[in-house]
Amino acid sequence: MQLHIFGKRLREERERLGLSQEAFGALGGVKKLTQLKYEKGERAPDAVYLAAITAKNVDINYLLTGKRLEVEALMDDAAAHHHLLIMIALKIGIDTDAMERLIFDAWKNEERRTAGKAVDDAAIGQRLDELLAQSTLARNEGIDPELLSEVMETTENILKASNITLPISKKARVIALLYRTFFKNKKVDEAVVQDAILVAAE
């Protein structure tokens, strides 16, 4: 396979995930300039890079063969929800490493609850509030966690009712856009959500 073809597919995968060259390069452990060279077909990535981006749900089959495996469709519900939360965190400027740790701790809490052990949901809630308060969006506009949660829930319900499937990166963009749309009035309009989903699905 020619390097420029691989580079074009790599750029498409990065855009599918909604990441900058710097952020995508970081997934593979390289700097922005190296990522740029990969995408231009000026340099070939090594196996360490390919293994690292594959672990972050990049469709390696598409990169190498041009045929998609629908990676997101292979994820279970928990993994898909986890990935969506990380994508939303990226969109609203939350530290994704901190978000990963918070999701892991919340998952451990659910394990403990299922086993009948005591859990501290207040601590998880407080950490989430702190993360939201530190986000880029919060510094610019403020963040309403309840509104964000309502936007996510309404979006998921309409997707399910409409039998529409969006890639996780696109769903995260839709949710972030809808959140900003509804932020001023603090009210979710289902018709607007429906329209946004239909446009995103085209």
Image: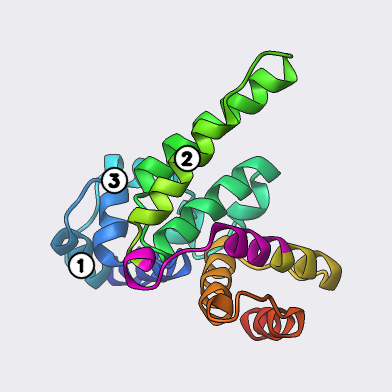
The answer to whether 99 is drawn above or below residue 148 in the figure is: above
Give the labeled residue for mark 3. Answer: 49
- For image coordinates 68% across by 78% down, the residue present is 197
- For disc 2, the marked residue is 126
Front residue of 190/76: it is 190
* Residue 91 placement, left or right of 140: right
The overriding secondary structure of the stretch rendered in magenta is helix
Image: 8 above or below 192: above
Nearer to us in this view, 115 or 73: 115
Which of the image's four quarters has the C terminus? bottom right
From the viewer's perspective, tell me whether residue 120 is left or right of residue 114.
left
Where does residue 17 sit, x and y in percent of width and height?
A: 45, 63
Q: Residues within 10 Å of mark 2 (few under 14, many from 20)?
A: few
Residue 36 is labelled as 1
Is 91 placed left or right of 156 in the picture? left
Residue type, numbered disc 2 = Gln
State which region is magenta.
Answer: 137-153
